């Protein structure tokens, strides 16, 4: 079962990553191998992502029941990402250290706010993964970036209430 058109799936993937919904496991094992695992390690990918590349654990689904987009609406356990979006998702995950941020602080609290991806760093990550930097990759990243920023904005608004 699919979650909609390819760009909608990228938005759902970004929302799932932003909300930490990478808990359930699918049947895919060791799809990438040691070369991709080494590249992920070079980009400081989390250990569980490297384990997936090596086949030491299974690939997580990027969606679970519950509030998938911060809207309060319940969802089914459904998430299917088309193979055409694999490179975009891989690059997005590898680029988590490339967010531009601002910090806001008062006497009572401090907050770090993502403002967008640093695309110079993201392009370097793409080269490191052996991906060709092109319009399709850039468009997909922009979709995932905006979805992540939307989720974080909604979460900030909830905290402010």
Image (spheres, helix red, strand yellow):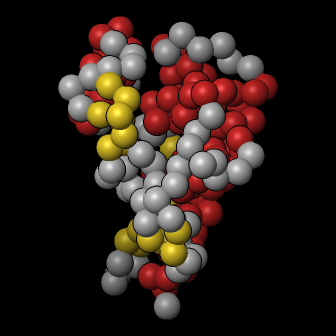
Q: Is residue 67 above or below residue 18?
A: below
Query: Which quarter of the figure has residue 61?
Result: top left
Left or right relative to 75: residue 8? right
Q: Residue drawn at (52%, 68%), measured in percent from left and top?
A: 75
Place of residue 32 in the rendered image (x, y in percent of width and height, measured from the top left): 39, 16
Most extreme residue toward the left is: 56
Place of residue 38 in the rendered image (x, y in percent of width and height, measured from the top left): 31, 14
Q: Residue drawn at (71%, 41%), measured in percent from left and top?
A: 6
Most extreme residue toward the front is: 1
Q: Is residue 47 above or below residue 150?
A: above
Most extreme residue toward the bottom is: 161
Left or right relative to 35: residue 129? right
Viewer-proximal residue among 28 and 43: 28
Most extreme residue toward the right is: 135
Q: Residue drawn at (55%, 77%), measured in percent from left and top?
A: 73
Q: Is residue 43 above or below residue 140?
A: above
Place of residue 58 in the rendered image (x, y in percent of width and height, measured from the top left): 29, 34
């Amino acid at each position: 079962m699919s979650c909609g058109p390819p760009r909608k799936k990228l938005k759902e993937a970004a929302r799932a990553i932003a909300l930490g919904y990478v808990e359930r496991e699918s049947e895919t094992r060791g799809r990438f191998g040691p070369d991709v695992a080494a590249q992920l390690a070079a980009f400081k990918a989390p250990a569980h992502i490297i384990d997936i590349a090596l086949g030491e654990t299974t690939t997580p689904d990027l969606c679970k029941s519950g509030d998938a987009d911060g809207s309060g609406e319940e969802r089914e356990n459904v998430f299917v990402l088309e193979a055409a979006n694999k490179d975009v998702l891989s690059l997005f995950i590898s680029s988590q250290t490339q967010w531009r941020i601002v910090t806001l602080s008062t006497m009572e609290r401090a907050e770090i706010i993502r403002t967008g991806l640093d695309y110079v760093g993201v392009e370097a990550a793409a080269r490191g993964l052996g991906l060709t930097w092109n319009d399709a990759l850039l468009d997909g990243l922009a979709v995932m970036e905006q979805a992540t920023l939307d989720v974080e904005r909604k979460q900030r608004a909830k905290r402010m209430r």
